[in-house]
Image (cartoon, rainbow, N blue to C red):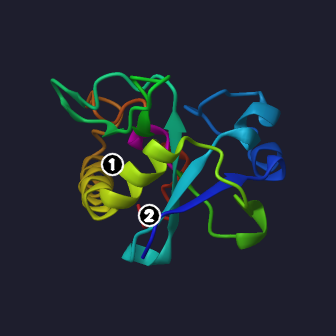
């Protein structure tokens, strides 16, 4: 599978206005303009969408990996943020990017490191599921800010 960049339609955020721990909470217009990378994890057939952020900062913190660094010339701290990944299984909520909205250098880096990104994200999701089953996801620093809390049933928890 190759990287797929898209936007998540504003209607998704409007329908799920009660979600917590989301980027740009309450600003559905901004949420719908944020570039997401689609990663389909085979577990339970879910489609995960990881947001690209301008200021991820360090992708590996003292408590673990929060994302994958993808700097550009203008945005040195940019990266994919695993903590704010969304599950969107309804394709009508997804708007594929026709034109590239990110710098070519970022696109190439994501394309070249895609299998590594998928594996890092798989480790993050599996860790989240394990922590959630033990009811520790709200206590562990790596997961307590995760938007995955909104998708417990989709992940079989």
| Relative image position of residue 45 (x, y in whole percent) | 48, 77
Q: Quadrant of residue 117?
A: bottom left
Which residue is at a point 55% across and 47% down the rendered structure image? 150
Which residue is at a point 18% across and 28% down the rendered structure image? 63
| Marking on residue 155 | 2
Residue 83 sits inside the magenta stretch: yes
Left or right: residue 131 versus residue 105 is left
| Above or below for 28 versus 85 | above
| Relative image position of residue 40 (x, y in whole percent) | 46, 70
Start and end of the magenta stretch?
Answer: 81-85
| Relative image position of residue 114 (x, y in whole percent) | 34, 60
| Above or below for 121 versus 56 | below
User: Front-most of 93 and 104?
Assistant: 104
| Marking on residue 44 | none
Q: Which residue is mark 1?
A: 132
Left or right: residue 58 versus residue 53 is left
| Above or below for 60 versus 32 | above
Asked if one can make out residue 148 in the rendered structure from this viewpoint, the answer is no
């Amino acid at each position: 599978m190759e990287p797929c960049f898209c936007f998540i339609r504003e209607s998704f955020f409007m329908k799920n206005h009660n979600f917590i721990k989301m980027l740009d909470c309450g600003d559905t217009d901004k949420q719908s303009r944020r570039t997401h990378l689609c990663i389909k994890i085979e577990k339970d057939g879910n489609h995960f969408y990881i947001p690209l952020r301008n200021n991820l900062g360090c992708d590996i913190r003292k408590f673990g990996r929060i994302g994958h660094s993808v700097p550009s010339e203008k945005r040195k701290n940019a990266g994919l943020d695993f903590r704010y990944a969304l599950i969107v299984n309804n394709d009508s909520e997804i708007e594929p990017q026709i034109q590239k909205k990110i710098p070519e250098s970022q696109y190439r880096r994501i394309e070249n490191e895609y299998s590594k990104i998928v594996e890092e994200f798989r480790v993050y999701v599996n860790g989240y599921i394990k922590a959630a089953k033990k009811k520790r996801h709200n206590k562990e620093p790596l997961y307590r800010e995760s938007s995955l809390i909104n998708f417990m049933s989709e992940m079989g928890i």
